[in-house]
Amino acid sequence: MGLPIKYVQVTSKKDQEQYWADRSRPYRYITVTEFANKFKNFHVGRELERELAVPFDRSTGHKAALVFNKYSVPKMDLLKACFDKEWLLIKRNSFVYIFKTVQIIIIAIIASTIFLRTEMHQRNEDDGALYIGSILFSMIMNMFNGFAELALTIARLPVFYKHRDLLFHPAWTYTLPNFLLRIPISIFESIVWVSITYYSVGFAPEASRFFKQLLLVFLIQQMAAGMFRVISGVCRTMTIANTGGTLMLLLVFMLGGFLLPKRDIPNWWIWGYWVSPLSYAFNGLLVNEFLAPRWMNKRSSDNTTTLGLSVLRNFDAFSTKKWYWIAGAALVGFTVFYNVIFTLALMYLNPIGKKQSIISEETASEMEGEGDSREEPRLQRPVSTREPVFRSLSSADGNNTREVAMQRMSSRTNPTQLRNVDSNIESATGVAPKKGMILPFQPLAMSFDDVNYYVDMPAEMKDQGVTEDRLQLLKGVTSAFRPGVLTALMGVSGAGKTTLMDVLAGRKTGGYIEGDIRISGFPKNQETFARISGYCEQTDIHSPQVTVHESLIYSAFLRLPKEVSSEEKMQFVDQVMDLVELDNLKDAIVGLPGMTGLSTEQRKRLTIAVELVANPSIIFMDEPTSGLDARAAAIVMRTVRNTVDTGRTVVCTIHQPSIDIFEAFDELLLMKRGGQVIYSGPLGQNSHKVIEYFEAIPGVPKIKDKYNPATWMLEVSSIAAEVRLGMDFAEHYKSSSLYQRNKALVTELRTPPPGAQDLYFATQYSQSTFGQFKSCLWKQWWTYWRSPDYNLVRYCFTLAAALMVGTIFWRVGKKRESSGDLSKIIGAMYASVLFIGINNCSTVQPVVAIERTVFYRERAAGMYAALPYAIAQVVTEIPYVFFQTTYYSLLVYAMMSFEWTVAKFFWFFFICFFSFLYFTFYGMMTVSITPNHQIASIFAATFYGLFNVFSGFFIPRPKIPKWWVWYYWICPVAWTVYGLIVSQYKDISTEISVGSDKVAINQYIQDQYGFKTDFMGPVAAVLITFTVFFAFMFAFCIKILNFQVR
């Protein structure tokens, strides 16, 4: 045992007893506090205390040891370095910027063909309103273009906070390049947009007005990017930022002067008009267009004012030329203001959430200083209201050695419960299942002969002159893994350890595999193999919002055979928790790695436990001790050893192990770079077998005393050593007797026992489809219930949006005097549903993205099919959206003063509910078809713009060109607006003024907007269809598409 581990273990309650020297006295646990007090009274501790009591004399310090500047490099050099880094990241992330540019080109083409100049006229105010629709669309699309900044900025915040706290550079050296280097990209996007749309739409033909619109579009983009950066810097998490971003957009949209003219904004909200950047942009764009000669040289319908001034007056816009320059100056001011606020936010705000590990009950007891200590307790525990649960012997007596654990499991086993769950397994091998735990399992061996693995040749290597089409990563690997034997898979970085494990476990998603892989003599079938194997990945991927106990219950109920009763599954989960020493952490929330919840070592043990509760016969573990300290690694290896001693086949890749960890293994499979085996055989006591093998090779130096055999072995078999010795270790191994012995063993294992049958399961998964759905729904429900940053935030947003819409459009439902009043109502309904829908869409994306990572692992383990998982996630959303719709509908309906009839309120509720649902499912779908939620948010933002333009608000359906009207019918927001208006006004025959005429409301909405008053049935059916379609696409895409590349 190495000294560092001894030092750590001697303070541990689990391990201390083995170091008790005086056997004549009964063992008593010596607490950490007692050790600390003894050290303080020891002469070394007293000497240290005396030294620390004397204040340090700074005059005696060397001048070179003092730092006089906060930053070690001049600020201009830091700025240059940050510029270089930012430029490099832009180049590396070029896909996002190319995607955005292509997106804006496509939408510009769509806009220019919707508002095509041959369909656009300058005859009257209605024609002017159509031009305003095109201007609004241009403004909104360039505003949404900045939405991508949210995801990109937040993704980089953790690295920035680390650099800031380590005093790499001040915040402004990060934000200045971030702002300046994106200006050329924005200029290019603005030129592309205006060049495509300006003359094809038919705006004022003067060149000066073209460039003026170009300037404003550029400034809108800069302002929007700055606004979203501020939201990112202040909110700091994706879910909260998406909500904050949508709320800010809702505010500037509602009070921008185009949904509700300035004269109609209530007095208590008029301040919002003056602080909304879009009100300035809107006025600037309108002044630039409608003060052009072609509008000013025509008379309006009253024959007194010019047509341009009449249109501006209808929308309560300013009508003097100076307002163009006021708008430009305001947008510049907002851009500077937002970037300054962003810089200040990065300077003074810290990341949300503290990095903290869960402390087990046992650790808490050790910290409190039991034993002889008289100190006050440092931890306050709540009084438990639970009934006492069964405690294992190890927890009671403070001794949890492997021998006691094995005795405990054997003694606890009830013979009446040990039945053969899968009788077909016994018939396959003719061997009775091993009964090391409450559930039987069949020990299985794995043999593999001449395994090769190829991938397509990377383009970079082809550019360097490599002519082959495929790159070989594994070359002729032959060996076997047996029950009850712990095998280490080792080699230098790039030797192919994890590649071999992925190939054998069937986890590769690409490439070409050759060779013979057998399980107890039968060819490996991946679907069957997934049922009897476990794979512990190097990255510990778990659902963050469930507890340790729930994680294991979930895995057990999905992976254990359906014949096993629920009671037995729960007992088995308890035994596995005991085996991997997690019983003291059963109620701890797993959390996100490095942020909340379990420590790295605890997560590693949970990863092992999640696979163990599946009762596998063969377990693969990818670097189970990486990133752990000596004590944590010792705990994990004890867990691994406990697992092997139950009779399972366990294989671990391991990288630079300590002596203690290395010698815990029974056998070694050593590989060299290029994927070739150079040793496969037993380690022996104190690694003497592997040492003898390599020392027998001429020219290999002898191992030094007390030198780590693992380190020595990797050093003497390196490529440099091969060059020095003029030999190939892989060829030497193939000519050795050890290779012949392994060949004979593989040949023996590839022949099934007489009368044995291949493993067979009647179904691909342990549980029925409904059983999978129930388990997935159970976990998803707990995940959502424990995600306040998701649910509470969107509920608060909905409440804020409802109050905002209700107070801005106060009692608007009672105003039925003119067509302008009806336009306001349509604008209110359109905006409120659209923005809450967008918020639902954007906030669900990070939640689905995190769970999708877990889904990839669980599906690969054969826990469930994609469809039950997707349906469970979809169903979990429904009650939350239902509650959201309930209070939103009650507030908005009452504050807008719509007619209080059961039918009308029901329709309003029904349409809002399914609109919010289809937006939520649309967000889930965008994640399922993109590699990450950053790309998903950019992709979703593309369609926000299309939903906008085809909603029937900016351009009514009768005025949409016939080559685009088909998209109106497949635009979900259009059906939402259709349903909301028709449900409220289909039976209202009150006349309103339209110009100089009087028209009944129900007739007007049919003539102007194309809304048929008897069309509510089809509207309801289509809204349900959109909801089901987006949910189905989410399920289909998450099943078909796999963005996890292995």
Image: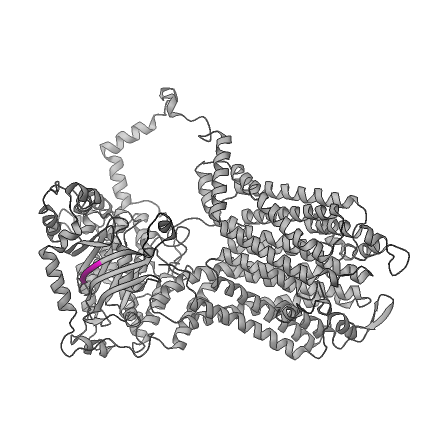
691 or 589: nearer the viewer: 691
Looking at this view, name the residue that lies furthest to the top.
59
Judged left or right of residue 861, residue 206 is right
The residue closer to the viewer here, 572 or 139, is 139
| x and y, in percent, of residue 546 in the image | 40, 62
Q: Is residue 77 above or below residue 968?
A: above
Query: Does the rendering let one see residue 810?
Result: no
Residue at the image position 81 percent from the left and 46 percent from the top:
320
Q: Residue furthest right?
A: 304
Residue 543 pos. (x, y %): 40, 61
Residue 114 horizontal side relative to residue 732, left or right: right
**Quick check: is 478 in the magenta stretch?**
yes
Q: Which residues are magenta?
A: 476-481
- Percent coordinates x, y for residue 503 in the rendering: 28, 62
Q: Nearer the viewer, residue 200 or 489?
A: 200
Instruction: Please tell me whether residue 723 is drawn above or below residue 510 in the rendered image.
Output: above
In this picture, residue 183 sits left or right of residue 69: right
**For the image shown, how many numbered marks are present on the structure?**
0
Residue 314 rendering spot, x and y as whole percentages: 81, 58
Q: Quadrant of residue 960?
A: bottom right
Tell me the quarter of the image containing the C terminus: bottom left
**Residue 68 lies in quadrant:** top left
Q: Looking at the image, can residue 246 be seen?
A: yes
The secondary structure that dominates the magenta segment is strand
Residue at (45%, 63%) from the top-left corner?
783
Magenta stretch holds residue 1035:
no
